[in-house]
Structures are given as C-alpha cells and as structure tokens.
Image (tube, rainbow, N blue to C red):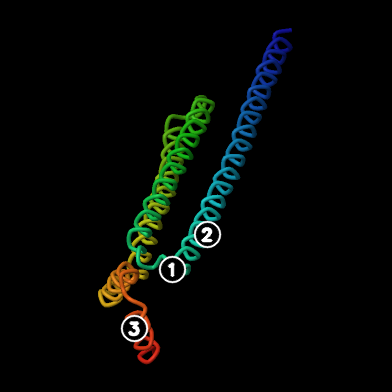
C-alpha cells in the first residue's frame, strides 16, 4: 500500500512539473513572438527613414538645379540639421518604444536566472545604441559630404554680386547705355 501511495505522489509531482514546463514554454513562445514583432517594427522604421532620406535628397537636388546654388551652403546646413533632428527624434521615439518592450520582456522573464535576464537586457540596449550611433554617424557623414560638394567658389560669388548690382542699377540706365551693355555682353559671351 505504501508503494502505491509513493507512486501516486510521484505521478502528481511529475504532472505538476509538466504543467510548469508547459507554462514556461508558452511564455517563451509569447516573448519570441513579441521580439519578432519588434524586429519587424525596427525594419519598418529603418525603411521609412531611408525613404524620407531619399525624398529629402531628391527635393534638395531639384531646388539646387533651379538656381538656388548661391544659397546652397546655408540650405545644405538647414537640410542637414532638419534631417539630423528628424533622425534623432525618430531614433529617440524608436528607443523609447524599444525600451518599453525590453522592460516588458524583462519583467516576463523574471522566472529565468538572473544572468540570463541581465544578458538579454544588455543585448537589447547594445543593439539599440548601435542603431542610434550608426544613424547619427551616417547623418553626420551625409551633412559633411553635402556641405563639401555644393560649395560655391569665391569667383562665382563675385560674379553673382556684380550681376545683382547691375540688375539693381539697370532701371536707372538710359536706353542707349542698356543697348551698349547688351552689345558688349553678346560680343563677350562664352
């Protein structure tokens, strides 16, 4: 009779362990699904940033080709700052969401060992920091290249200043003076 009672106790313990393991497996499956959704969200945010970056680049190139080259240094600086601010705000927004998900995931994994909890949180934080740093470095590199590529040389600036002065004083010239300047310009045009 004693052996029968011990066997029943062992069956109850075994059934309890099986139920606990099934619960843990369900928690891990849920966490894996959440991490997969988080990964999809990060990929979507990166795609949106790339699209926004490309749209900003195309917009700036069109503006420059329409005669805004004289103001390109100031414009590129503003565009870089706008892109940098948007990239940083998007990164901060993503970091905030990522941190919330990491905290929820961390709290759900409280049944695991302390070492695995710490290593997972560190991994998530390091991945987040790496993403922000790579985006920031890319934005700074783009701004540096953009400023160097579209600078107007001093000779061109001087010619633009002369043209602006001539345009302002053109109204005060007589018809004879205007015709004479037009002939000189046609004669010396490249």
Q: Is residue 147 left or right of residue 43?
A: left
Q: Is residue 19 above or below residue 164?
A: above
CA separation, marks 2 and 3? 44 Å
Residue at the disc numbered 1: 67
Q: Is residue 187 above or below residue 42?
A: below
Q: Is residue 180 left or right of residue 92?
A: left
- Give the residue displayed 74% in from the left and 12% down from the top: 4
Q: Mark 1 or 3, which is nearer the eye?
A: 3
CA separation, marks 1 and 3? 24 Å
Residue at the disc numbered 2: 54
Residue 153 falls in image quadrant: bottom left
Disc nearer the start of the sequence (1/3)? 1
Looking at the rendered structure, the secondary structure element under dot 1 is: loop
Residue 23 falls in image quadrant: top right
Residue nearest the viewer, comparing 172 with 133: 172
Q: Is residue 11 left or right of residue 173?
A: right
Residue at the disc numbered 3: 181
Residue 41 falls in image quadrant: top right
Residue 1 position in % (x across, y down): 74, 7
Q: Is residue 50 left or right of residue 126?
A: right
Residue nearest the viewer, comparing 183 with 22: 183
Disc nearer the start of the sequence (2/1)? 2
């Amino acid at each position: 009779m004693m052996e029968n009672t011990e066997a029943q106790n062992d069956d109850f313990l075994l059934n309890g362990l099986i139920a606990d393991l099934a619960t843990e497996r369900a928690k891990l499956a849920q966490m894996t699904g959440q991490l997969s959704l988080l990964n999809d969200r990060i990929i979507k945010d990166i795609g949106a940033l790339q699209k926004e970056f490309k749209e900003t680049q195309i917009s700036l190139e069109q503006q420059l080709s329409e005669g805004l080259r004289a103001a390109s240094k100031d414009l590129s600086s503003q565009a870089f700052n706008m892109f940098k601010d948007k990239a940083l705000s998007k990164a901060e927004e993503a970091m905030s969401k990522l941190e919330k998900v990491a905290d929820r995931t961390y709290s759900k994994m409280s049944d695991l060992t302390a070492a695995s909890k710490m290593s997972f949180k560190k991994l998530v934080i390091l991945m987040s920091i790496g993403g922000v740093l790579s985006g920031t470095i890319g934005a700074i590199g783009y701004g540096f290249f953009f400023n160097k590529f579209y600078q107007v040389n001093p000779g061109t600036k001087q010619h633009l200043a002369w043209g602006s002065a001539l345009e302002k004083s053109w109204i005060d010239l007589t018809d004879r003076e205007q015709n004479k300047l037009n002939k000189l310009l046609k004669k010396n045009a490249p």
